[in-house]
Amino acid sequence: MKKQQIPSLITTFERATDAALQRVAGEGAPALAIALSGGLDSSALLHLAHGYAQTRGVALYAFHIHHGISANADAWLAHCEQACAALGVTFAARRVTLVRKEKTGTEEAARKSRYAALGALCAEHGVKLLLTAHHQDDQAETVLLQLLRGSGPAGLSGMDAANAAPELLGNPELVMARPLLPVSRKQLAAYVAEHAIAHINDESNDDPRFARNALRHKVMPALAEAFPGFQERFARSAQHAQSAQRLLTELAEQDLALCLDGDCIDIGKLRTLSTDRANNLLRHWFQLRQLRMPSAAWLSEMLVQLLEARDGAQPLITHPDCHVRRHRDRLHITPKLADLEGTREDEFDKEPGTSFKWNGETELAFPAYGGVLHFDLAAEGEHGLDADWLRTQQLLIEFRRGGERLKPAHNRPTRGLKYHYQALDIPAWERSRLPVVSAPKQLLFAAGIGMDCNKLVDGAGRLRLRWQAV
C-alpha cells in the first residue's frame, strides 16, 4: 500500500508545482521557496520540493518565521536550519513581533505577520513562487470553519491551488501555491514515516481553545467515523463553491461596469438591480478596493440607509476601513481621516487660523490643516500674485468660517464659497478640510476652488497658490 501511495503523492506534487511554475515563468533561472515550520506537513514538503528541485534544475529556498510565542521557538528554528543544511537547501529565517489589533486573536495576528514576512523574504531573494504545505484535511477544516461562520460561496470556496494575495503577502509579483491540497494528512504521515523524516511538534496545535484545533481533534474524527472520506467530498464542495463564486464575480463585473461613474456608484442604476445583485456588486466593489468584506447584515443596513435617504441627504456609513457616503445620487468610498484642528461642524465656531509670512519658499507644510501650500510661478499669459507684495503681507490660513466670498475672474461674479463648492460638485465632507488663505481684509485663495482675481496682476515673477492634501 505504501508503495502505491508514495508515487501518487510525488506525482500529484510534481504536476501541481509544474503548473504553478508556469504561472511565474519568465526571464532567468526558475526558483521556488517553501514555507517551513518544521512540523510534519512542511517537513514532507521540504523533502518533496528538494527532490523536485534536483530533477528540474530549480533553485530552492526554505523560509522559516519565528513568532516567539512558544518557549520552543528557538529550537524549531535551529531544527529547520539543520534540516535544510543536511539537504543543501538555502535557508533563511525572519523573527516577527505580533501586533494584535482590537478583536484580532493571537492566531489571526500570527497568520498575518507570518505571511507578510514570507512575502518579504521572497522579494529579498527574487522568488516569485511560494509553496505551502496545506493539504486536503486543511481544506476540509477551512470549509467547515467558514460554514460555521455563516460564510457565502467566497468563504466556502476554501483555498485555491494557487493564487496571488498581495494584500496578505505584501508582494504583488508573488504566487502562493498549495501543491499538496489533493493529498490527505494520512498520506503525508505515511510519506514522512517511510523516509524517516524528522519533524517537530508545535504544542499550540493541540490547544482546543483555537477553533481549528477544536475541529481537528474533536469534530473531524467524529466525522471520519460517521462519514469516511468526507474530506474528499468537502474538497469537491469547495470546487463547486469556487465555480459559483467565479460566476458571481463575472456578474458583479458586468453590473459594476453598468453602475460605475468614475470612482462612484450611480444610485439610480443600482436601484435597477435586485437586492441580491446589488449586494453582490457591492461586495465586489469592496474587494476591488481591498477593504474587509462586510457582513450580510451590515451590507443590508447600509443599502437601506443609503438608498432610502431623502433627496439632498448625505448619509454616512462607517466601515472598519473606510466611510461609505452618498452625494448627488452617487455612492462614494472615502478614507477614514484623522480629525484636523478647526474642522468642527459649526462653521461659525472655528479655532483661530494660523498666521504666517511668505519668504520665498516654493511650498509650506501645514500639518494641522492636512496638507502643503505651494507657491507656483504663473504660466505664460496667466495672472498671479506679485511676489514683492506677497512678502510684505501677514498671511492667514484657516478653515472656512462662513460668509467668505471669492471672484474667480474679472468677467465672473463674486460668489460665496458654498456656491463655488456646489458648482464644482465638491462633497460637503471634503469642504470641511479645504483651507482658505487670506491677506488682511482680502481672501486670496480657497483650496478646491482657486485664486481670487482681485489681487492678481500681470508681470514677471507672478505666483499662484496651490493646495495639496497629504
Image (spheres, rainbow, N blue to C red):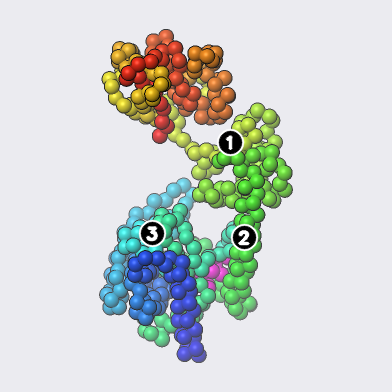
Q: Which residues are magenta?
A: 136-144
Q: Earlier in the sequence, mark 1 or mark 2?
A: 2
Q: Position of residue 410 (x, y in %)?
A: 49, 13
Residue 376 visible? The answer is: yes
The residue that mark 1 highlights is: 325
Q: Can residue 234 be seen in this snapshot? A: no
Q: CA distance from mark 1 to mark 3?
A: 34 Å
Which residue is tagged 3? 119
- The kind of residue tagged 2 is Gln
* Disc 1 secondary structure class: strand
Q: Is residue 137 magenta?
A: yes
From the top left corner, tell me how far across and down residue 169 is, in percent.
42, 57
Q: Are marks 1 and 3 in contact (CB under 8 Å)?
A: no
- Classify residue 313 as left or right of residue 67: right
Looking at the image, is mark 3 or mark 2 earlier in the sequence?
3
Residue 71 or 186: which is nearer the viewer? 186
Residue at the spot of label 2? 245
Question: Going by the image, does 401 lie left or right of 461?
Answer: right
Which image quarter is the C terminus in? top left
